[in-house]
Image (spheres, rainbow, N blue to C red):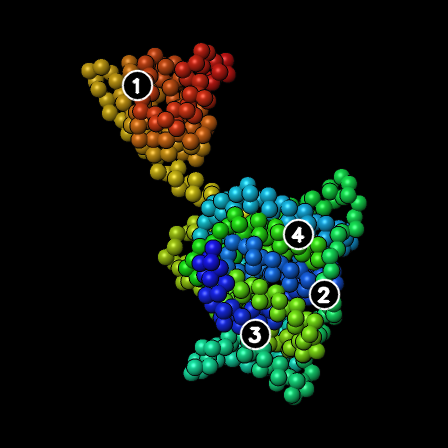
C-alpha cells in the first residue's frame, strides 16, 4: 500500500504541484464558459470542477488525468435546464453518478476494445479542432492588441523551454499566463479578461440535496438526460485515458475509472455542481506541464477553489488572450499530425473511418455521435475484409463419383453468399463431402447457407457428409441448422 501511495502521490511532487497551477488557471474560464453553455450560474461549473478534480484524484483509475466540467456534457444539459431548472440538473447529475458506478461494476469499459485506433485518432483530431474553434470568439472582432498578446503567449509557450535551467523548472504555459497578466495590468490594456466572463463565487460550496419530488415522474424526466450524460462522460473519459496511457507509456484501470467518475459526479451534484468527466485538453496541459500523479489532479482542484475565493481580484485580471494561447497550444499538441502524413500509406478504409469520425464530431459537436459513426463504419469495413478471406476448393474422385469441398476461412453474414456461390449444384455426383476442418461458422446466416448447400445436393440425389466442424461451429450448427432434421427440405424451401 505504501509503495502505491509513493508511486501515485509522492513520486513527482514538484511537477504535480506546478502542473496543478496551470490546469487550475485554464479550468476557471472553461468552467465559466461551460456553465454559460448549460444555462446555469458560473459557480455551478466552478464548484463542479473543484469537486470532480479533488474526488477523482482519490477514486479514479488513471493518475495524471484531469476531470472537471466539460463542454460535451454541458451541451446535453441545455434542454433540461431550460425546461425544468437547476434542481433537476442536480438530480440528473446524481443519477448519472449512480449509472456510471453501475457501469464500472458491470465492466462496460471492456467495450472500448471495439473502438479501433482510427476511431481514436479521429476523435482526438476532432477534439483538437473543437478546442481551436472554441477560441475563435475570443479572436473575432477584437483589436490588434489581442492578436499581439496571443502571439506573444504562443511565443513564450514554445520558446521558454529553451531557456537554460529555468526553462525546465517552470511550465511554459504558467509563465505565459503570469507574464501576460502582469503586462496587461502594468500597461492598463483594455482587453477582455476572465472577469468579463461572469461573476466568481465568493463562498465555499455547501451540501445541497436537489429540491425535486422523489417520484416516478421526476425519474422519467431526468433519466434520458442521465443516460446521455453517462454514455458521453464515460466515452470521453475512456478515450482520454487511452491518450494519456500513450503519452505516459503507462496503463490505467478503466473499470475503476468508471466508478471514480460516478462517485465524483455524485459529489458534484451534492455540492451544487453539474456533471463532468475527463478532459482531454486539460489532461494534455497537465502532462505537458509535468503532471504525472494523482497529486496533480488534487492540486488543480484545491488551487481552483483557493484562486476563486482568495485571489479573485488578481484572477479576474488574467487576459483571455493568455488562456487562448494556452488552449491553442493544447489544440496543436492534441491533433495527430501523423494521421495527415499517413493518409497516403494507410489503407483507404482506415482513412475513411478517421475522416468520418472527425466530420461527424465537428458537425454535431457531439463526441458520442462521431465515435458511434466511426465504430459502425470500422465494423462494416472489417466484416467486408474478413469476408474476402474465405476460400472453397474441391477435388474429384471419379472412381466413386465423390467430390470433396475444402472450406477455409470465416463463414458469416458477409461471406455467406460467396460460400453458396462456390458449390456447383449442376454437377451429377453420387457423393459430396464438405470438409470444414479449416473453417469457422459464426452466425445463423452462415448456418443457413450450409443448410441450403446440403439440401440442394441431397435434392439432386447426392449423399452429403459434413466433416471437420470445430466444437464452437458444431454448437451453432447443431442448434440452428435444419439439414439433418426431419422435413428439412420443406422447412428451408418453404413447401
Q: Which residue bears the numbered disc 3?
A: 325
- Point out the frontmost of discs 4 and 2: 2
Residues under numbered marks 3 and 4 in contact, where contact means CB atoms less than 8 Å apart: no
479 relative to 259, above or below? above
Q: Which residue bears the numbered disc 1?
A: 432
Instruction: Assign a secondary structure to mark 4.
Output: helix
Badge 4 crowding class, 10 Å Cα cut-off, few under 14, some 14 to 19, many 20 or more, is many
- Point out the frontmost of discs 3 and 2: 2
Q: Which residue bears the numbered disc 2?
A: 204
382 relative to 40, above or below? above
User: Rounded to the nearest whole Å, what is the CA distance between mark 2 and mark 1?
Assistant: 81 Å
User: Rounded to the nearest whole Å, what is the CA distance between mark 1 and mark 3?
Assistant: 73 Å
Badge 3 crowding class, 10 Å Cα cut-off, few under 14, some 14 to 19, many 20 or more, is many
Q: Residue at x 49, y 59 (%)?
A: 5
User: Rounded to the nearest whole Å, what is the CA distance between mark 1 and mark 4?
Assistant: 65 Å
In the displayed structure image, the side of residue 194 where residue 470 appears, left or right: left
Amino acid at each position: 500500500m505504501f509503495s502505491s501511495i509513493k508511486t501515485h502521490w509522492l513520486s513527482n511532487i514538484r511537477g504535480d504541484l506546478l502542473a496543478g497551477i496551470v490546469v487550475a488557471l485554464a479550468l476557471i474560464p472553461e468552467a465559466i464558459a461551460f456553465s454559460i453553455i448549460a444555462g446555469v450560474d458560473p459557480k455551478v461549473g466552478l464548484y463542479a470542477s473543484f469537486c470532480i478534480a479533488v474526488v477523482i484524484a482519490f477514486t479514479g483509475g488513471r493518475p495524471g488525468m484531469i476531470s472537471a466540467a466539460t463542454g460535451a456534457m454541458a451541451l446535453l444539459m441545455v434542454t433540461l435546464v431550460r425546461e425544468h431548472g437547476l434542481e433537476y440538473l442536480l438530480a440528473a447529475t446524481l443519477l448519472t453518478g449512480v449509472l456510471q458506478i453501475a457501469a464500472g461494476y458491470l465492466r462496460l469499459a471492456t467495450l472500448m476494445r471495439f473502438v479501433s485506433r482510427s476511431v481514436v485518432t479521429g476523435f482526438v483530431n476532432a477534439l483538437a479542432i473543437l478546442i481551436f474553434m472554441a477560441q475563435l470568439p475570443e479572436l473575432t472582432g477584437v483589436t490588434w492588441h489581442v492578436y499581439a498578446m496571443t502571439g506573444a503567449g504562443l511565443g513564450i509557450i514554445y520558446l521558454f523551454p529553451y531557456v537554460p535551467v529555468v526553462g525546465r523548472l517552470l511550465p511554459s504555459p504558467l509563465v505565459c499566463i503570469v507574464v501576460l497578466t502582469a503586462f496587461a495590468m502594468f500597461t492598463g490594456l483594455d482587453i477582455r479578461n476572465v472577469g468579463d466572463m461572469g461573476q466568481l463565487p465568493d463562498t465555499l460550496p455547501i451540501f445541497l440535496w436537489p429540491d425535486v419530488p422523489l417520484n416516478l415522474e421526476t425519474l422519467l424526466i431526468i433519466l434520458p438526460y442521465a443516460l446521455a450524460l453517462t454514455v458521453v462522460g464515460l466515452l470521453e473519459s475512456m478515450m482520454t485515458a487511452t491518450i494519456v496511457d500513450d503519452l505516459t507509456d503507462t496503463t490505467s484501470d478503466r473499470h475503476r475509472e468508471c466508478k471514480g467518475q460516478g462517485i465524483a459526479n455524485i459529489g458534484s451534484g451534492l455540492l451544487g455542481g453539474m456533471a463532468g468527466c475527463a478532459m482531454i485538453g486539460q489532461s494534455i496541459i497537465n502532462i505537458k506541464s509535468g503532471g504525472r500523479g494523482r497529486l496533480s489532479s488534487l492540486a488543480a482542484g484545491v488551487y481552483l477553489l483557493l484562486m476563486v475565493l482568495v485571489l479573485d481580484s488578481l484572477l479576474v485580471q488574467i487576459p483571455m488572450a493568455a488562456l487562448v494561447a494556452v488552449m491553442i497550444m493544447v489544440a496543436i499538441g492534441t491533433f495527430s499530425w501523423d494521421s495527415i502524413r499517413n493518409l497516403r500509406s494507410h489503407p483507404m478504409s482506415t482513412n475513411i473511418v478517421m475522416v468520418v469520425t472527425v466530420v461527424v464530431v465537428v458537425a454535431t459537436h457531439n463526441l458520442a455521435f462521431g465515435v458511434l459513426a466511426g465504430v459502425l463504419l470500422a465494423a462494416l469495413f472489417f466484416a467486408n475484409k474478413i469476408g474476402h478471406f474465405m476460400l472453397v476448393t474441391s477435388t474429384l474422385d471419379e472412381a466413386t463419383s465423390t467430390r470433396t469441398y475444402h472450406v477455409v476461412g470465416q463463414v458469416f453474414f458477409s461471406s455467406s453468399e460467396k460460400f453458396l456461390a462456390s458449390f456447383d449444384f449442376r454437377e451429377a455426383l453420387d457423393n459430396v463431402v464438405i470438409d470444414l476442418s479449416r473453417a469457422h461458422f459464426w452466425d445463423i446466416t452462415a448456418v443457413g447457407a450450409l443448410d441450403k448447400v446440403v439440401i440442394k445436393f441431397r435434392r439432386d440425389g447426392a449423399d452429403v457428409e459434413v466433416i471437420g466442424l470445430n466444437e464452437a461451429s458444431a454448437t451453432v450448427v447443431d442448434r440452428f441448422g435444419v439439414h439433418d432434421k426431419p422435413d428439412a427440405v420443406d422447412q428451408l424451401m418453404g413447401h
